[in-house]
Image (tube, helix red, strand yellow):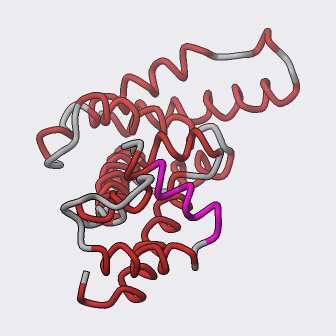
Amino acid sequence: MSNDIWSDLIPRLKRDLESRVRGDSLRRDDDAWITAASMIRRYGLVIPYTHSGLTQDDANDIVQDVLIKLQTPGTLERLEVSGSPTGYIAVMVRNGATNLIRDRRRKSAFEEPLPENIAFVFEESDSETGDPKRSVRLREALTHLSPDERTLLRLRFWRGLSIRQISEKTGISYSATAVRLFRILQRLRTRLGAKM
């Protein structure tokens, strides 16, 4: 039944896209997109139950992503020739959920905190309880970082900003920020050795 709906709906969606490209607002078919959204939303409703850690808000975002992907002629063409548009949409939704989970896991792997005793390095004087030798080694290691790298460390560990907040503040993408922080920490650990 739903494949029959898609077989009628896909040509309407294609005509709507063509009308939008031509700027022909009289031939737009918003109802076709509303129907498509309703069909896709059905799959989104089960995401929180089938993919641990995802919420209904995540599911709504995935549904929106699928709708955006459908707004390209190539995707609509693949949907049409798939043999089972319903199955194709279900796979798109499932893949969206899987990708979101994978991205979150990858990003959380970069959020590795510095050791607690590293914070005293940026204070004016060494903490009375801190190990002066450790402080000297850490200061030495930090001098090998660029000013931008030290700024990233300050934002993350001294100001307590999340990677997303740092990304927004610096204008660097989330993944680039996460990768840079990860590499900085790896270099510091290598330079300091296991004694830290």
Residue 145 image position (x, y, % from top left): 58, 73
Q: Image point 40% across, 50% down: which residue?
A: 92
Of residue 121 and residue 194, the one placed in the foreground of this image is 121
Q: Is residue 146 above or below residue 125?
A: below
Q: Is residue 108 magenta?
A: no
Residue 113 image position (x, y, % from top left): 29, 61
Quarter holding the C terminus is bottom left
Quadrant of the image occupied by residue 11? top right
Q: Which residues are magenta?
A: 146-155
**Residue farthest toward the right in the current orientation of the protein:** 22
Of residue 133 and residue 9, the one placed in the foreground of this image is 133
Dominant secondary-structure state across the stretch colored magenta: helix
Q: Is residue 29 above or below residue 115?
A: above
Q: Is residue 104 above or below residue 110?
A: above
Residue 141 image position (x, y, % from top left): 47, 79
Q: Image point 52% across, 67% down: which residue?
A: 180
